[in-house]
Image (cartoon, rainbow, N blue to C red):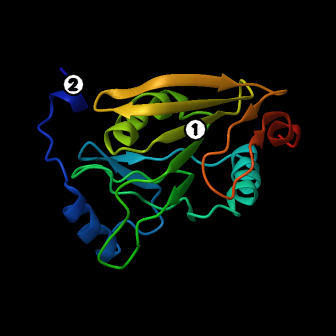
């Protein structure tokens, strides 16, 4: 009888151990992130994913907060996701990675279930007030707000023809049609 991964004892990593592994170079060129103490492979980026990130980066660049692109957030002691985009106010130093953000954006194609599920729970628990999931296949932007310990209490979906409200100072509302016109 074969043993499945769920039957094997697993030694969870915490964020400090993850940082030490990263610093050692053992994960160089590996697309992984730490979620719930487990290294999770990140999906390869499609051309549509890359273009969406580029368009959203340009849109969010004028924000008063600092824009981080595909950089990690230490949202829990055992979770260090790498959102596609984040607006942060916390200072970033070698010894301190941001633990929350004003806005987190995940561009989703194959990662939609985890972006809507576990990542939404982690970002809400970290107090991220606004979380966008850009659903490439359905051409919508899901906006989650009102975070709590068990997730976001409010979800609004914006389609072409709608404008997503500004997530912060210096950022215009997002024209959903314009975003998806190039995709």
Which quadrant holds residue 19?
bottom left
Element at label 2: loop
**Spatial CA span between label 1 and label 2:** 40 Å
Q: In which quarter of the image is the C terminus?
A: top right
Q: Which residue is at a point 85% across and 27% down the rendered structure image? A: 161
Which quadrant holds residue 5?
top left
Q: Mark 2 points at which residue?
A: 2
The picture places residue 51, in percent across and down from the top left corner, at 76, 51
For marks 1 and 2, the one nearer the N-term is 2
Q: Which residue is at a point 69% across and 46% down the rendered structure image? A: 49
Which labelled disc corresponds to residue 132? 1
Task: Give the residue furthest to the front.
Answer: 169
Which quadrant holds residue 92?
bottom left
Q: Which residue is at a point 36% across and 44% down the rendered structure image? A: 127
Q: Give the answer, above or below, for where 62 lies relative to 37.
A: below
Q: Do the residues labelled 1 and 2 touch (CB within 8 Å)?
A: no
């Amino acid at each position: 009888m074969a043993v499945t991964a769920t039957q094997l004892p697993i030694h969870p990593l915490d964020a400090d151990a993850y940082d030490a592994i990263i610093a050692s170079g053992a994960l160089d060129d590996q697309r992984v992130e730490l979620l719930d103490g487990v290294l999770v492979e990140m999906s390869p980026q499609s051309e549509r994913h890359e273009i969406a990130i580029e368009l959203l980066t340009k849109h969010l660049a004028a924000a008063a907060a600092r824009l981080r692109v595909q950089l990690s957030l230490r949202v829990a002691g055992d979770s260090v996701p790498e959102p596609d985009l984040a607006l942060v106010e916390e200072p970033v130093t070698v010894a301190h990675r941001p633990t929350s953000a004003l806005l987190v954006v995940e561009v989703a194609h194959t990662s939609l279930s985890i972006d809507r599920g576990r990542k939404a729970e982690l970002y809400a628990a970290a107090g991220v007030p606004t979380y966008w999931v850009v659903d490439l296949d359905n051409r919508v932007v899901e906006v989650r707000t009102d975070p709590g310990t068990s997730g976001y209490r409010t979800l609004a979906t914006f389609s072409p023809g709608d404008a997503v409200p500004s997530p912060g100072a210096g950022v215009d509302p997002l024209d959903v049609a314009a975003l998806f016109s190039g995709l």
